[in-house]
Image (cartoon, rainbow, N blue to C red):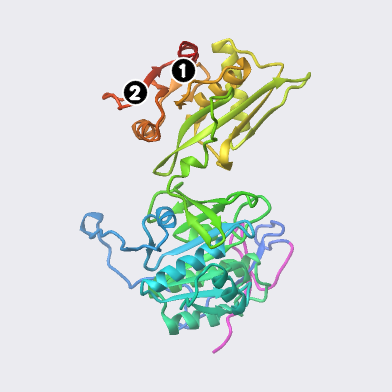
Amino acid sequence: MAKDKTIYTCTECGGISPKWLGKCPHCGAWNTLIESVAESQSPVKNRFASLAKPSEVATLADIEATDMARTPTGHEELDRVLGGGIVEGGVVLIGGDPGIGKSTLLLQALDSLQRAGLDTLYVTGEESGAQVALRSRRLGLDGSQVKVLAEIQLEKILATLEATRPAVAVIDSIQTVYSEQLTSAPGSVAQVRECAAHLTRAAKASGVCIVLVGHVTKEGALAGPRVLEHMVDTVLYFEGDTHSSFRLVRAIKNRFGAVNEIGVFAMTEKGLKGVSNPSAIFLSQHAEPVPGSCVMVTLEGTRPLLVEIQALVDSGGPSPRRLSVGLDRDRLAMLLAVLHRHAGIACMDQDVFVNAVGGVRISEPAADLAVMLAITSSLRGKPLPKGFIAFGEVGLAGEVRPAPRGQERLKEAAKLGFSVAVVPKANAPKKPIEGLTIHAVERVEQAMDVVRSLE
């Protein structure tokens, strides 16, 4: 069988060159030619064949829509992020820092699926089979029947998938896999894109669920071309500090479930274990209320989480510092301006430090009110009442705007024993929530007055 010809394609105009050039001969752009493989003229070997059988044009009303069958992995937190479990023919990309636990979690999941009766395959390109076996014994997976293949050549991996037909296969990692059709080194843009495309087509054609492990860059983004994230069905990010025992798995993209869903794990001697009550991670255990602390309810996907916001206001020099961890620094500067203009609380000559406890990152504006109350509490040196929570977006005009799904946030707070809440007026429930006193406010000034009245 003749080998496909290597060509170079311009990422700007799509032009083709038979050899690499610093400047595209078609559009004149510099350093835009990347290696690719020319499409074979043989009808038998068509790299871009359709993933499914040809079908006739039909209207949406005539197409029968059925829910995708899901298979639980045996790890409730991982199933939550995946949208209920793995899907036949689905392709999942999971990335994270080195040593954070990607291979550990996937090996545990494969062992659970294998014990449930599904055939599994673990393809390792970074470790030998003996290293994978040593890790499985360290995790307590004695007698595991998960099949292991130590291989990095794409063609051999595809042949093994065709021969063994596993239900789930893990490729650890996609950056180590290479195709003989390309001359570039493993991990290059062309190799990652080409190998991921072949594996995706194999998954769709055979019904094998393939999980790709991806490296990340210094900035924390997935290494390789952005098209890698577009090819796959689900993109998961492994987050967490290597110095902490807790890990977060966040869904950035999911064609079969909700995005921004998170799963919380704790790293133990026997691997990663799901955390059933993640709110406990993000709340500090104070014997008595302390100044500068305010608890808020944030939403991560469909899950409400209680997170403690801590603020420290201290006298600063001529150039006061504004530092935030887990929150947007620019938004902190905006909230300080609103606090001064509409509530009469000035921090112009003060250093302001804000932190979200537990290493969680909060991107939604519903944290605004809790941040402002924590700053005010620290500045005045007076703690907020015990069992106090707050959430709500604050606008530049000083108004307190509603947060989405406020009822679920309040019910979660009441379930965990909180008794006093300051929330936007639009989020006030029509029916009282047992054990929870709710103060609905429309303005920042009203929120400050409510807090003073509770002292």
Residue that appears at 50% across and 72% down:
198
Residue 86 at x, y percent in the picture = 39, 63
Crowd around label 2: few <14 · some 14–19 · many ≥20 (10 Å): some
Q: Nearer the viewer, residue 244 or 260?
A: 244
For badge 2, the amino acid type reads: Ala
Residue that appears at 65% across and 71% down:
186
Whether residue 186 is situated above or below residue 439 in the rendered picture = below
Q: Nearer the viewer, residue 393 or 33?
A: 393
Q: Nearer the viewer, residue 349 or 401?
A: 349
Q: Is residue 364 left or right of residue 221?
A: left
Query: Which comes sooner in the sequence, label 2 or label 1?
Result: 1
The reply to whether the magenta stretch includes residue 20 is yes
Q: Residue furthest left?
A: 62
Label 2 to label 1: alpha-carbon separation: 15 Å
Residue 279 at x, y percent in the picture = 47, 40
Query: Secondary structure of the magenta portion, mostly?
Result: loop
Q: Residue furthest bottom?
A: 1
Residue 368 visible in rendering? yes
**Which picture quadrant has residue 204?**
bottom left
Residue at the disc numbered 1: 399
Whether residue 236 is situated above or below residue 293 in the rendered picture = below
For badge 1, the amino acid type reads: Glu
Answer yes or no: do the residues labelled 2 and 1 have beta carbons within 8 Å? no
Specify start and end residues of the magenta stretch as a single range. 1-22
Foreground disc of the pair 2, 1: 2
Residue 387 at x, y percent in the picture = 45, 26
Q: Judging from the image, what secondary structure is the residue with disc 1 in?
A: loop
Residue at the disc numbered 2: 428
**Which picture quadrant has residue 37?**
bottom right
The reply to whether the magenta stretch includes residue 188 is no
